[in-house]
């Protein structure tokens, strides 16, 4: 390209000099001005040509045409120059068409280089196109569109959003907990373990379209000199009527006496009060029991004081929302993106996947010392295990997400549908959850729920269930427990049962309408 531009410029100089020589042979009063004009034009054109070298590729052809036509026009104005100008004119015309041809070739080459530089930016779009192409392979022989592919494209963006934002939440909460632990190093408050992602958002489905709540469970360990003990009557009472009794233990002959720690059991209270920070029994307990509300308020204040020491505090603004049994956070990025996070507390039952949680199952007035049995960690583990076993194009989460997003205005809970899907995943061949079986599995889910409503019985997944994956660890009491009916209220209240059947028919209508709108 540089050689071509130089040749054009030299040609232009020859024409200008030829013209100036002709003028020199016929001197008159205006000769000095006319001799200076070509030199000034030459300097201007030289600068223009140098600038044109740096011009974007889309202007190159236009620039070359301008140079050639300026040259031709100038030559025509000085046709008196004779044979030299005529020959140069013919050469210029030939050169113009040659340059035009070359410009098309070079622009094509430039386009290839540009596309190569944008390859990384277009990679994600290409991957999506490949996914859609793979999905199209599931179409039937009649060429009908695959309903599974449609809902996959419709819901895929929300799944990717959940993956991305859940990673952000883990990073933010992990930094917060690290800052909190540093402030608690010499205290006798509960020990904060690593957070565990639970709930629908971390299971990669969500009944809420745009404002998913990222729920994490933070296990609490007893601090030095203390122990946690579960107090519950029967297994059924553990669901919503359990307490955590806090006891002081002797530390005289243990490694916990490292430093200046005094044993709570074998030192006078006055000495402890003067020389040691308060016991857990004097801070977050009501009587001998760990208080949920006191724990939540303490943790909220702890987060506020630790936030300024978190690196992400320069990019996020944290607001603690009102809550008496958990810690709800609103994290707003400088870009305006908002994350809703809820942190609940739990005490692990031995080495199992079952916790006593601060979160209450039902929205009822619950004493502040009451902790409920939580299966959220076991459920998250179950879906993680299923993700390894199901086909790569499995639609079990898509089925669950579609069903739960139609529940608004009904008395059904998303947990009921979640329980149905878990039962079906362990009683049906996993190969049957492929995308091409999407409609069949939706029908199975609705048929199973209708059967449960008619029988007024839906068994809890983790009670007396032999199909639970062996990787999920349950306490011995749950392994021996009788089945627990989640629809017990329907068996006791005929009016509630009639209402549930009516709402089920409404759900069927909504689902059919959704599928009909697709067609």
Image (spheres, rainbow, N blue to C red):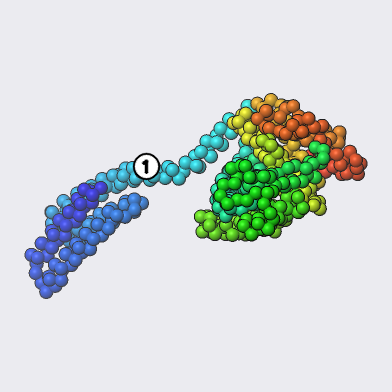
- For label 1, the crowd category at 10 Å Cα-Cα, with few meaning under 14, some 14 to 19 and many 20 or more, is few
Q: Quadrant of residue 155?
A: top right
| Total numbered labels placed on residues in the image | 1
Name the residue located 15 percent from the left edge and 71 percent from the top edge.
33
> In this rendering, is residue 360 above or below 80?
above
Where residue 466 appears, x then y in whole percent? 74, 27
Where residue 197 appears, x then y in whole percent? 63, 43
Residue 220 visible to an observer of this rendering: no
Name the residue located 66 percent from the left edge and 43 percent from the top edge.
198
Q: Quadrant of residue 303?
A: bottom right
Q: Quadrant of residue 80?
A: bottom left
**Quarter in which the C terminus is drawn:** top right
> In this rendering, is residue 96 above or below 424?
below
* Residue at numbered disc 1: 112
Quick check: 425 left or right of 86?
A: right
Quick check: 3 left or right of 420?
A: left
User: Which residue is more in the foreground, 247 or 450?
Assistant: 247
User: Which residue is more in the foreground, 312 or 278?
Assistant: 278
Where residue 460 appears, x then y in whole percent? 78, 35
Name the residue located 27 percent from the left edge and 58 percent from the top edge.
51
User: Which residue is more in the foreground, 105 or 384?
Assistant: 384
Where residue 135 appears, x then y in whole percent? 58, 33
Name the residue located 63 percent from the left edge and 45 percent from the top edge.
252
Quick check: 264 left or right of 55?
A: right
């Amino acid at each position: 390209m540089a050689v071509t531009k130089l040749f054009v410029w030299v040609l232009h100089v020859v024409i200008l000099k030829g013209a100036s020589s002709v003028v020199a042979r016929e001197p008159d009063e205006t000769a000095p001005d006319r001799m200076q004009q070509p030199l000034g034009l030459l300097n201007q054109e030289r600068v223009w040509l140098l600038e044109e070298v740096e011009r974007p590729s889309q202007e190159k052809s236009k620039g070359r045409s301008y140079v050639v036509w300026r040259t031709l026009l100038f030559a025509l104005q000085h046709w008196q120059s004779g044979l030299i100008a005529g020959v140069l004119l013919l050469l210029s015309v030939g050169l113009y068409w040659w340059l035009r041809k070359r410009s098309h070739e070079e622009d094509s080459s430039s386009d290839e280089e540009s596309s190569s530089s944008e390859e990384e930016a277009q990679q994600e779009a290409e991957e999506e196109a490949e996914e859609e192409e793979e999905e199209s392979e599931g179409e039937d022989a009649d060429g009908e569109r695959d309903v599974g592919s449609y809902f996959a494209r419709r819901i895929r963006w929300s799944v990717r959003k959940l993956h991305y934002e859940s990673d952000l939440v883990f990073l933010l909460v992990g930094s917060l907990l690290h800052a909190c632990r540093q402030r608690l190093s010499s205290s006798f408050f509960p020990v904060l373990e690593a957070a565990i992602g639970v709930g629908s958002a971390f299971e990669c489905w969500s009944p809420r379209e745009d404002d998913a709540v990222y729920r994490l469970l933070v296990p609490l360990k007893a601090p030095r000199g203390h122990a946690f003990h579960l107090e519950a009557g029967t297994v059924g009472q553990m669901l919503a009527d359990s307490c955590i009794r806090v006891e002081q233990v002797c530390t005289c002959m243990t490694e916990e006496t490292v430093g200046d720690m005094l044993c709570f059991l074998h030192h006078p209270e006055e000495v402890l009060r003067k020389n040691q920070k308060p016991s857990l029994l004097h801070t977050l307990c009501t009587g001998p029991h760990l208080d949920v509300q006191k724990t939540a308020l303490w943790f909220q204040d702890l987060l506020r004081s630790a936030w300024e020491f978190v690196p992400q505090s320069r990019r996020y603004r944290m607001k603690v929302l009102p809550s008496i049994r958990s810690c709800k956070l609103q994290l707003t990025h400088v870009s305006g993106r908002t994350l809703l996070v809820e942190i609940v507390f739990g005490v692990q039952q031995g080495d199992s996947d079952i916790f006593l949680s601060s979160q209450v199952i039902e929205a009822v007035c619950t004493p502040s010392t009451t902790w409920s049995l939580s299966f959220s960690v076991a459920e998250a583990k179950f879906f993680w295990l299923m993700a390894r076993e199901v086909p790569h194009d499995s639609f079990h989460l898509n089925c669950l997400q579609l069903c739960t997003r139609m529940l608004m205005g009904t008395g059904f809970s998303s947990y009921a549908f979640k329980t149905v899907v878990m039962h079906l995943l362990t009683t049906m061949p996993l190969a049957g959850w492929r995308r091409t079986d999407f409609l069949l599995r939706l029908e199975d889910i609705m048929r199973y729920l209708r059967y449960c409503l008619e029988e007024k019985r839906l068994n809890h997944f983790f009670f007396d269930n032999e199909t639970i994956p062996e990787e999920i660890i349950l306490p011995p009491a749950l392994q021996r427990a009788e089945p627990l009916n989640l629809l017990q209220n329907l068996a006791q209240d005929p009016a509630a049962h009639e209402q549930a059947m009516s709402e089920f028919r409404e759900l069927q209508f909504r689902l059919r309408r959704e599928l009909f709108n697709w067609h």
